[in-house]
Image: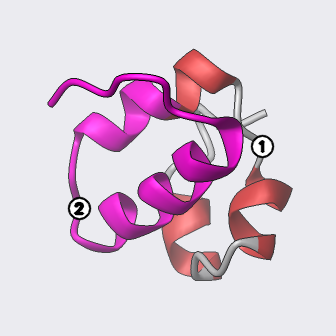
Amino acid sequence: MQFVNLTRMEAIEKVCTMLESDCKEAYSIITLFGLSAEELLEAGASIETVKGAKNILK
């Protein structure tokens, strides 16, 4: 999947959706933007999902 002109907020929202569906591409976006667990939790990601991705989150 290729994104053009993706803002940080759009990336956070997209990652939350992608993580819920177990999409591996979410990890690329997380590392590209350097997203934090706090940002994802504030955007609505579940605690279980964020804990599952803790090895790549800041």
The percent coordinates of residue 50 (x first, y second) are 59, 63
Mark 1: few, some, or many residues within 10 Å (few <14, many ≥20)? some
Q: In this picture, is 6 found above or below 19?
A: above
Residue 14 on the magenta segment: yes
Q: Which residues are magenta?
A: 1-29
Residue 11 on the magenta segment: yes
Res. 26 image quadrant = top left
Q: Quadrant of the C terminus?
A: top right
Mark 2 vs mark 1, CA separation in Å: 18 Å
The percent coordinates of residue 38 (x first, y second) are 84, 59
Which secondary structure, mark 1? loop
| Residue in the picture at 68% in, 50% down | 9
Q: Which residue is mark 1?
A: 36
Res. 14 image quadrant = bottom left
Instruction: Please tell me whether the stretch drawn in magenta is mainly helix, strand or loop.
Output: helix
Q: Is residue 7 left or right of residue 23?
A: right
Q: Is residue 22 left or right of residue 49?
A: left
Q: In this picture, is 57 found above or below 54?
A: above
Residue 5: which numbered mark, if any?
Answer: none
Q: Are marks 2 and 1 in contact (CB under 8 Å)?
A: no
Q: Residue furthest front?
A: 5
Mark 2: few, some, or many residues within 10 Å (few <14, many ≥20)? few
Q: In this picture, is 24 found above or below 20?
A: above
Q: Which residue is mark 2?
A: 22
Please, what is the three-letter code of the amino acid marked with disc 1?
Ser
| Residue in the picture at 26% in, 36% down | 25
| Residue in the picture at 68% in, 38% down | 8
Q: Quadrant of the N terminus?
A: top left
The percent coordinates of residue 19 (x first, y second) are 37, 61
Please, what is the three-letter code of the amino acid marked with disc 2?
Asp
Circle nearer the N terminus (2, 1) = 2
